[in-house]
Amino acid sequence: MKQCYATRGFLPCQDPATELVLGEPYAVLDTVGNSLPSLLLEKDARNYLRRVFVPDWPYINIPDDLWPQACLYYVRLGFIASGYINQIGQPSCHSLPANLARPLCKIADLMQRPPILSYDGYALFNWRRFDIRKPVQLGNIDTIQNFVHLYDEHWFILVHIEIEALAADILDAVLSLQGEVQPRDVDAALDKIAMAMTSIIQVLQRIPERMSDELYFSKFRPYIGQFQDVVYEGVNIDPISYRGETGAQSSIMPLLTEFMKIPHQDNRLTRHLYDMRQYMPVDHRVMLEQVRAMPDVKTVANSDKFDAVLELMACFREVHYHWAIKYIARRCNDQQGTGGTPYMRWLKFLIEETRGHKKSGGKGTVVA
């Protein structure tokens, strides 16, 4: 799959496909996908979804020109599967029927990812522009697929899309430091990263504008939950568990962590975070490893510029931390995020260790 990191960040180069054009039988996925928010309000939704014939991905691989179609195929199936397993108001379910499990597992295998809806399907591949002449930003984008008839869910996804678009400047800055670089090149890259992070934080702060904490928690957060001991009928008779969709599967902060060489302690929390990488697109994982192998810029960077990026990373995590309290922690005693993340402790550790990596010795605001 072609990548345009410097101009699109971790978003696909080409705007996502909004309709499957693989042949008439595949239209069923668009039909069911578009109807899913209504279907999930019905008690017999699972009975209906068990009877839907979903054709397999028609190729033994994914041709380059069909990546947008493959992504939409995965998005539709991922949403339907998560809606089936996690349907609100219905008994818990631990078995995905073969008509959904087989095609989902096949496309997931070709994409080298677990067979569950993750951040890439929920956000990165799930948007369209109203006006293709205008930027990928709030006000000019909408979602392709949703779980519920609430704009709150659209907003939740779309905020992440603009953040990903803004992160293109971060990738451009990091990728500019290939080979032998001078201190002035590092400082220019850090300035560009800082500007992008400032814009990203401003967008993340907009979450409450159009997303109710009550509606998030009760009406659509359950649909992006993890699969616990689920049997994929026709594929594997043994129950298996997968992480649910979560922003921790975005590649932006992991990339910055690798670039800045932040030495997070090796513990259960950071191992959990590293495990999230298997849910990222495979090319994103490769990019993270490439950045991991880059030289440490700390020794040659201007102290103020280096520390400014770290402070902005910590501030981003603080905003995330406070939204986690507002949207999740205040409504339950569960200390797990949607991806199974022990977020309260995890985010505090990351914030403290990020500030502790500063050249000035780690001064900064402390999370209350």
Image (cartoon, rainbow, N blue to C red):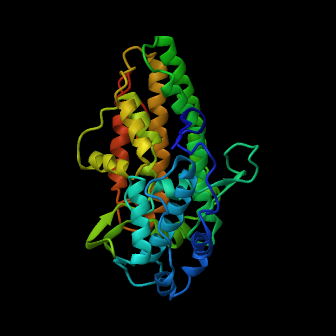
Q: Examine the rendered structure and indicate whether residue 264 appears above or below residue 83.
A: above
Nearer to us in this view, 50 or 195: 50
Decide if residue 249 is on the left or right side of residue 126.
left
Nearer to us in this view, 365 or 304: 304
Q: Position of residue 336 (x, y in %)?
A: 35, 61
Q: Examine the rendered structure and indicate whether residue 162 appears above or below residue 219.
A: above
Number of labelled discs?
0
Within the image, what quadrant is residue 27 found in?
bottom right
Within the image, what quadrant is residue 152 found in?
bottom right
Nearer to us in this view, 200 or 303: 200
Residue 211 in sight here: no
Q: Position of residue 307 (x, y in %)?
A: 44, 25
Q: Position of residue 2 (x, y in %)?
A: 53, 40
Q: Residue at x 43, y 77 (%)?
A: 99
Nearer to us in this view, 49 or 172: 49
Residue 188 in sight here: yes
Q: Examine the rendered structure and indicate whether residue 93 appears above or below residue 287.
A: below
Q: Residue at x 53, y 46 (%)?
A: 64
Q: Position of residue 134 (x, y in %)?
A: 74, 43
